[in-house]
Image (cartoon, grey):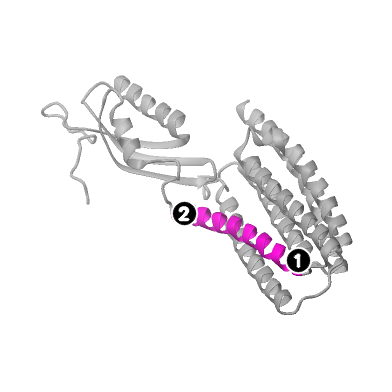
Amino acid sequence: MESHESQRQSNSYQKPLFIALAITSIVMIAEFVGGLLANSLALLSDAGHMLADCLALLLSIVAFRFSSRHPTNRNTFGFYRLEIFAAQINGGVLVFLSFFIFYEAYQRFMHPEPVKGLLMMGIAGVGLLANMASALVLHNTSKKNLNVKAAFLHIVGDLLSSIGVIIGGIVISFTGWFVVDPVLSLLIGLIILKGAYGVVKETAAILLGAVPKHVDLEKLIREVEAIKGVESFHDVHVWTITSGLYALSGHVQIQDQRISESAQIMEGVREYLTQRYQIGHTTLQLECEACEPGHACSLVTRPSSK
């Protein structure tokens, strides 16, 4: 029953993403064609920024699709990591795109070309309206899901870029300062590069098994050791399976006691980790100082291998 509810919720999240993807794709093509007609590098750069948004939206949709697939005997965690690989490729493409924009802007600085400011402004205005529509479609859902929130922030960034291109079109139309066009391109390129750097850095950390950013490992250990019944918490590893899905493994040392009492302690640790750190997948190994004399026990604490 829970899986059906999860699937229904996933489908409700995907609908606004599909709508935003359709709007953004159409306007991206319009801005690309308009940039060629207006000879505006800023407009072409904004189309590139929209391409980044399309990739981000598509990535979010793919993440939802794959997250609903059941794990297999070979892929015991499911297919969540495909989202991270896709994001890594996405980030690499964005880095290349931003440096290409920088190169083209440099060429425009060296060899200025006339730009049709009014056409540039008109196409950017259409892009602004489309970005506003996409932002409105995603706004409510972005409050409920981090995946959608990331896509929403991409759209907001593109909305700001469209405003910049409109301002540039106005300045060019009234002053004839064509240098405004490559200046805007550089700014848009920097926005794309900043976002790409964040994506590459975050996905690299996940692939390397780094501790999630919101987790202070030493503090987490101290807090777990403060839970009633826990003597020590060590050999702790925390990592990210995919964005928003965290896992932990560790050794919990307790007093020698009945299994039912031990289970209560373990449940308390798991519940705390879920509520405090959103760690939904925990693997905990019980240990104790020593068992009753004459009894062999696999839970006795062994010297650390370090």
- Residue at screen point 30% across, 20% down: 261
Residue 171 percent location from the top left of the image: 80, 60
- State which tag comes first along the sequence, 2 or 1: 1
Q: Which residues are magenta?
A: 179-208
The span from disc 2 to disc 1 (Cα, nearest Å) is: 36 Å
Nearest the viewer among 249 and 106 is 106
Task: Say if the magenta span includes residue 183.
Answer: yes
Expressed as whole percent of the image width and height from the top left, the position of residue 203 reads: 52, 54
**For residue 65, which quarter of the picture?**
top right
Residue type, numbered disc 1: Asp
Is residue 180 placed above or below 297 in the rendered structure?
below
- Residue 52 spot, x, y in % from top left: 69, 57
Q: Which mark is residue 205?
A: 2
Whether residue 69 is visible to the viewer of this picture, yes or no, is no
Say if the magenta span includes residue 166. no
Question: Camera-side residue: 21 or 66?
Answer: 21
- Between 260 and 156, the residue placed more toward the observer is 156
| Circle 2: residue type | Ala
- Residue occupying the point 50% across, 46% down: 241
**Label 2 residue SS:** helix
Helix, strand or loop: magenta stretch: helix
Q: Tell whether 202 sits left or right of 150.
A: left
**In the drawing, what numbered circle is on residue 181?**
1
Q: Secondary structure at mark 1?
A: helix
Q: Residue at x 29, y 34 (%)?
A: 222
User: Is residue 240 rendered to the left or right of residue 13?
Assistant: left
Identify the residue at horizontal 11%, vertical 27% (top origin): 293
Numbered mark located on residue 165 in the image: none
